[in-house]
Every structure is written in structure tokens, then in C-alpha cells.
Amino acid sequence: MATRADEALRPAAEDPGGPRRLSAHTKRPVFLNPLQTKLPVTATVSLAHRISGALLVLALPFTVAALERSLASAEGYARLAAVFGHPLMQLLLLLATWSVAHHVAAGVRHLLFDVGVGTRYGASRQSAWAVHAIALLATLAAALALWS
């Protein structure tokens, strides 16, 4: 009867669960730290697209509540304007600006992929850099508008 230690040292070819990535020195599975892995720019756009979408979904109830308060009365609008004057809230607004800009730019990129535009490796990398640049420029423009 095989023990757990024997199973850990069994070669990948004998593994009934399929091949595993094994370390050359210890014959044990390799732990890949995702924070130390260098991702290609196309992967960072995909990951950021998911993060920006999640942030937009989380921000939606607060956005609707803020819109409702601002339209309810002049006093509600003034109170909301005071809240949005706080530096922490301004940083959250910049995060929301980045989320919208990145999500829209990455969404347009994916729509272009659907019609066959930019699917080659070089064009895909260029469009990925363009998505990052558009989101950064939109966020910088919002920061300038907010603090000037």
C-alpha cells in the first residue's frame, strides 16, 4: 500500500491524475507565485478588464444612490458635493474613472477581435498597450480636471 510520501515522489507519467509540473531537484510539484510571474501585456489587460468590471458592478448601487440624492433636493445636492470634495472620495472617483475608461477600451478591443481586427500577435500586443494608455490618459485628465 502506497503512502502519501510515496505518491508525492511518484513520477508524473505514473500519476493517474495526469501530468504535473515537477521540480527537477525534489520531484515535488512546483509552486508558482502569481505575484512573481511576469505576465504578458495581453494578460494584464484581460485581468484588469475583469477587475474594472467588478469595480463597476460594486460601484453601481452607490452611484444610483448618489444620483437619487443629488436629484431629490438642492440640499441633497449640496451635501453630496461636500462629500465629493473630500480627498479620499476624489481618489475613489479617479478609480471609478480608470474603471470606466479601461473597461470601455478593453471592451472595444474585444469587439474588434470578434470581427477579426487585431487578432495577430503584434497587433494584439499593440492594442493591449493602447488600452492601458487610454485608461491612464483618461484618469490623468480626470485628475487634472478634479484638482485644477
Image (cartoon, rainbow, N blue to C red):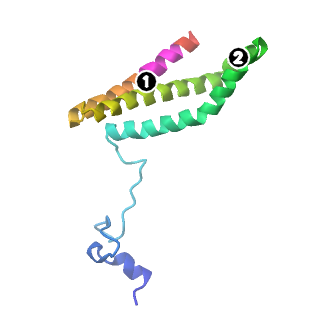
Bounds of the magenta segment:
136-144
Q: Residue at x 26, y 74 (%)?
A: 13
Q: Position of residue 24 (x, y in %)?
A: 28, 67
Q: Position of residue 63 (x, y in %)?
A: 63, 27
Q: Quadrant of the C terminus?
A: top right
Q: Which residue is identified by label 1?
A: 136
Q: Residue at x 57, y 14 (%)?
A: 146
Could you tell me the amino acid type at mark 1? Leu
51 in the magenta segment: no
Q: Residue at x 40, y 90 (%)?
A: 1
Q: Earlier in the sequence, mark 2 or mark 1?
A: 2
Could you tell me the amino acid type at mark 2? Leu
Which secondary structure is most common in the magenta stretch? helix
Residue density around tag 2, few if under 14, some if 14–19, many if 20 or more, within 10 Å: few
Quadrant in the picture for residue 40: top left
User: Does residue 82 show up?
Assistant: no
User: Does residue 34 show up?
Assistant: yes
Say if 11 sits above or below 109 in the image: below
Label 1 secondary element = helix
Label 2 secondary element = helix
Q: Position of residue 147 (x, y in %)?
A: 57, 13
